[in-house]
Image: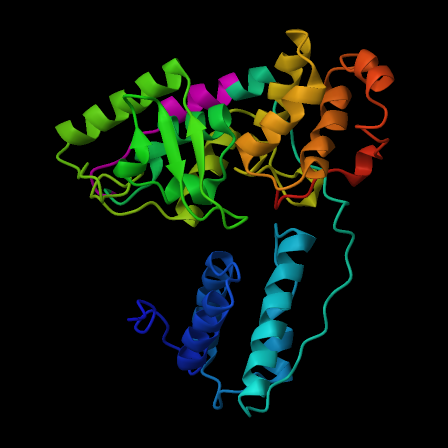
Amino acid sequence: MVNNNSNKFKSVFSIMIVKYIDYMRSMSLESRTAEIRLAQFDKFAYERVPEGVGITKELADEWGKIRSNETPNNRYQRISLLRRFSSFLQLHGIDSYLPKLPKYDKNAFMPYIFTTKEITDIFRESDKLHVHRKYLNSSKFVMPTLIRLLYSTGIRIGEALSLKHSNVNLCDGILTLYKCKNGEDRLVPLSLSMREICKDYVSYKERMNIKTEDDSFFFTSPCGNQCLRGSIADSFKIILQRAGIHHNHNRVGVRLHDLRHTFCVHTLYRLCEQGMDLYYSMPILMTYIGHKSLSATNRYVRLTEEMYPGILKNVNKAYKHLFPEIELNNETNESD
C-alpha cells in the first residue's frame, strides 16, 4: 500500500513517524489524532534540528512545556503520544528518552456554556465579518455557516473541517462523518433552517467560482483552500471579542469546542421542556454526538441543572440509578 505520508514530514524523525503511523493502522488503533500531533512534533523538531533520530531529554522537556491557553488534557496527550513514539523508537534499537507523564485531574475541566443571548450575539458578529481582497485565504468567509453548523449539530470542529461536498446531502439534510474520534462513522441530520443556510453558502461559493465538486472540501477560503483549525480559532476569538464575551474562562479561554458542549446542554434543556423521557432520550443524544458510553453524555445533565435550576428536579427522583450525583467542578473535559 502506498503511504501518503511519505513526503508530509520533514524532520530527522520523518521516516520513523511514518512507520509508527503505519504500525498504528496495522493494529487498528485510532491514528487520525496521533497523526495530527505527530505532524506538530515533526514541525517542532524540524525547527530545532536535532542531530540524531533518538529523542533527547532536552527535546522532550521543551516539547512538554506548558503552553498558554492549553488545557491540562491537551498537554497530557501531547506528552503521552511522544512517550509512546519514543518507546516505538526504542523497539527499533534507537536510544530515545521516555518523558514522564504529568499529573492532572482529567475531570477538573469545566466547559463554557453559552447563553442563548450569547449565541445570538455570536451569530450577529460572525455575519459582520468581511474578507479583504488582499486576504483571500482568510477563514472569515466560512464563519457564519460554520458556527451555526457547530451549534446546531454539536459536531466537532475537526469533523466539520473534514467535510467534503459529497458528505453534505442537502436534499435529505444529512451529514456523513467518517472516522470520527471514536473511529466510527455516523450520520448527523440537519434542521430545515440549517439546510437552507448551507444551500445559501454553496450557492455563494458557486457564484464566486469556488470549487463545489464532490471531492472538494465544504469549508474553504475564498481561494479554495481547506480551512485550517488555527485560522478558524483566530476568527472565532475576534467574534467573541466583538460580542463582548471574555476569553479567559477557566484559565483556558472560551473555545470553538464549547459550541459542542452548549449544543448538548441546550438540547437536554429543550427535551426537558418538552416533557420527554430522558431514559430514552439520553441514549439518542449519546449516539447523535458520537459518544461511546452513556456516562460521557450524562455529564451534561448536571451542567443543564446548573444553568437552568430546577429543570431536572423530577428527573432526579425518577432516575436516580441513571444519573448519579456528580460534583459540578468535575464535569466534562474538552475532549468529549
Q: Quadrant of residue 82?
A: bottom right
The answer to whether residue 172 shows anywhere in this view is: yes
78 magenta-colored: no
**As drawn, 167 above or below 305:** below
Residue 186 lies, with reference to residue 9, above or below; the image says above
In the rendered image, the residue lying farthest to the top is: 274
Q: Which corner quadrant holds the C terminus? A: top right
The magenta segment is 120-135
Q: Position of residue 241 (x, y in %)?
A: 52, 31
- The residue positioned 44% from the left and 30% from the top of the image is 188
Relative horizontal placement of residue 64, taking residue 308 as reference (left or right): left
Residue 37: image location, x then y, percent: 50, 62
x 83%, y 16%: residue:
318
Name which quarter of the figure residue 100 lies in.
bottom right
Which x, y percent locates residue 259? 55, 31
Seen in the picture, residue 67 relative to 145 is either above or below; the reply is: below
Q: Identify the image quadrant of residue 211.
A: top left
Image quarter in which the N terminus is found: bottom left
Depth check: 186 or 99 in front? 186
Horizontal and vertical percent for residue 278? 70, 19
Nearest the viewer among 35 and 205 is 35
- Work out whether residue 234 can be spotted: no
At x 33% / y 33%, what residue is drawn?
142
Closest to the observer: 29 or 313?
29
Residue toward you, 92 or 139: 92
| 122 in the magenta segment | yes
